[in-house]
Image (tube, rainbow, N blue to C red):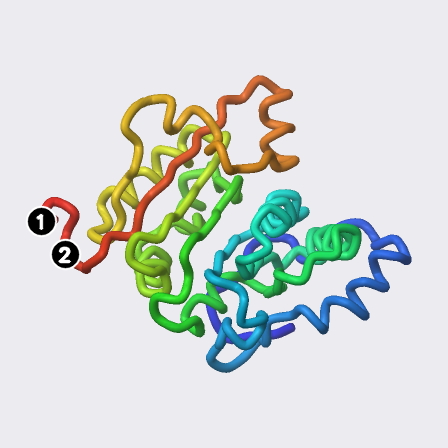
Amino acid sequence: MAQDGPRFYGRRRGKKLRPGRAALVRELLPKLRVPAEGLVDPEAFFSPGKRSLWLEIGFGAGEHLAAQAQAHPETGFIGCEPFVNGVAALLAQIQDRDLDNIRIFDEDARLLLPRLPDAAIERVYLLYSDPWPKKRHWNRRFVNSANLDQLARIMVPGGLFRFATDHPGHARWALGQLTRHPVFRWTARGPADWRARPADGFVTRYEAKARSQGATCVYLEFQRLPSNRPAAAL
């Protein structure tokens, strides 16, 4: 789908989908898809009983998103993922687990953020996104001042942004970007807070692969402050 907006550098497709998953993309995805254009009203996607809205950016194969949705049926979830094979994997989990609280934006998340209303999202996840390790590619990393400004706008005061990576340079980059931003406060009180996955988190296949290869995973959590004043002034 051609769209005006930021240039996308990731993959759109991998191996040919199996017939069952291809059918899910054809038949189930249109029922769950967040529209590609216009302002988004998240409340229109979910039943009135959904008390909050969470967002996952780049859900990969959807293990974490599906597990969170099953654990929190009272919450509405929007997952962003432009890789069609990952979308198909999530659709299979939605079907298998009979989940009704997930909606999918199968495009670059940066195209969705400006279309979401202010103070609509209670929690945001960015887990094991591409670290773009080469210095000339650092500008492609999702965590930057422009995207953080958008997250600050769409998140409710007190909302949580959770970031995880197995790439040390990416962790340092994200920590630097977020601690410099006036609207986000790092919640860590000690090393255990960034060395262990949050108690209410779920493992992804990327994390499992990283750990099997001996990599160290870093988990960063930031709270959206209740005003636009710098953290030091609160």
In this picture, residue 201 sits left or right of residue 98: left
Considering the numbered disc 2 on the image, is that residue within a helix, a strand or a loop?
loop
- Determine the residue positioned at 14% across, 51% down: 230
Task: Please count the marks in the image.
Answer: 2
Structural distance between the alpha carbons of marks 2 and 1:
6 Å
Q: Can residue 184 be spotted in the picture?
A: yes
Question: Quadrant where the N terminus lies?
Answer: bottom right
The numbered mark at residue 153 is none
Considering the numbered disc 1 on the image, is that residue within a helix, a strand or a loop?
helix
Foreground residue among 103 and 206: 103
The residue beneath circle 2 is: 229
Foreground residue among 205 and 129: 205
Picture coordinates of residue 234 (x, y %)?
12, 49
The residue beneath circle 1 is: 233
In this picture, residue 220 sits left or right of residue 31: left
Foreground residue among 24 and 146: 24
Quadrant position of residue 156: bottom left
The vertical placement of 9 against 194, above or below, is below
Q: Can residue 146 be spotted in the picture?
A: no
Picture coordinates of residue 169 (x, y %)?
40, 32
Picture coordinates of residue 39 (x, y %)?
47, 80
Q: Residues within 10 Å of mark 1 (few under 14, many from 20)?
A: few
Indicate the amino acid at tag 1.
Answer: Ala
